[in-house]
Image (tube, rainbow, N blue to C red):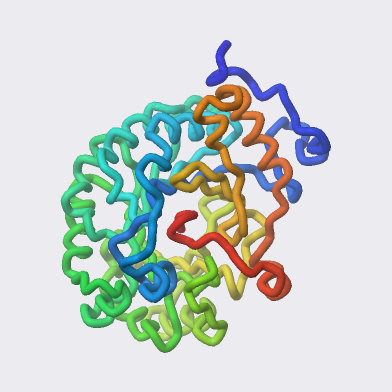
Amino acid sequence: MDARTAPLLWMPRGAAQSQPADGALRDQRLRPWRDLRISLTDRCNFRCGYCMPRSRFGPGHRFQPQAHLLSFEEIAQVARQALALGVRTLRLTGGEPLLRRDLPELVRQLSRLRTLDGTPPDLALTTNGSLLAGQARELREAGLGRLTVSLDALDDAVFQRMNDVGFPVAEVLRGLEVAAQAGFERIKINMVVRRGVNDDEALPLAEHFRGSGMVLRFIEFMDAGSHNGWKLDEVLPSDELRARIHAHWPLLPLQATRGGETAQRWRYADGGGEVGFISSVSHAFCGDCTRARLTAEGRLYTCLFAARGHDLRPLLRGAQGGEAELREQLAAIWAQRADAYSEQRERLRAEQHERADMHVLGG
């Protein structure tokens, strides 16, 4: 029996209270690990203000050199051991993941892995959609199951102002059409909403995607990272936004499809489809968060708002042990996890002066 198939026999000291009788891995708040978000690069071709503002990430900014990035084989090692600990969903992110060369090969490698119950992982990708039209078919054929596309406005002038590189909204919409034709049956659209910046675009986006089969989700402007100029008065609470939409198209609540789901789900009463609201600021969902994030250079973060991560590169590059040791390290990291930033935002913002930026961690 090798490291890929051996059962988890090791338990970190002091973690016994985190392991219930069923043997499933839990953190200090008894949350299981179900989702691994894998950043493929810290580079992006957009300069959205809430993530990579040009004032901080201009022409002189130094990104990670190629040699520092995890190889596809190293990414697959981490994914394999995470799946052995109960992870079910692997989401590829960035930066902009479609900038990573030969991405379909990584998708093929990950699609061949198996969860604890012997099924393929739920394999998803989040993208800004700028390169989607040229890659959607090959990614689908390689085994990618689900897509999430960021789209912060339908009006071209607003969209170009938001991405700050003059990229046209029409090309993202074309990418969505190609993706639907390629066979992606469930495509989600994420809109980050900033009061006074693009909140007037919420209703046009809702109208555009009603009846399309695609699920539009509205994300409250979050204080991720240390450089996006977050202000509480730019947060449009989901309850207020939902009331705006409800006034035009009545909404009815839907049950969550699984534990740890980030979005509150609602459906149009007239059958026009579904919308979601991700409310990290106004309605913290730390209590059932099941996500960890692997950066492109091999650091594991257990919270989107964390100040530091755990460096896995010594294990991945042969300096310390092999895959069995990697699994033990991953188990220890999760068992010690107690993150609840959104529930403790006011105190932690005062204590933490630097946090990892979202383009490094993946959204």
Q: Is residue 330 above or below residue 293?
A: above
- Camera sees residue 289: yes
In the image: residue 362, left or right of residue 259: left
On the image, the x and y values in percent for residue 13 come to: 81, 33
Q: Residue at x 46, y 58 (%)?
A: 363
- Camera sees residue 115: no
On the image, the x and y values in percent for residue 273 come to: 35, 65
Residue toward you, 347 or 80: 347
**Quadrant location, the N terminus:** top right
Q: Is residue 314 above or below residue 130?
A: above
On the image, the x and y values in percent for residue 91 come to: 43, 46
Q: Residue at x 56, y 43 (%)?
A: 34
| Residue 218 lies in quadrant | bottom left
Residue toward you, 284 or 207: 284
Q: Is residue 191 above or below residue 148?
A: below
In the image: residue 123, left or right of residue 335: left
Q: Residue at x 73, y 44 (%)?
A: 336
Residue toward you, 237 or 297: 297
> Quick one: which residue is furthest to the front in this view?
60
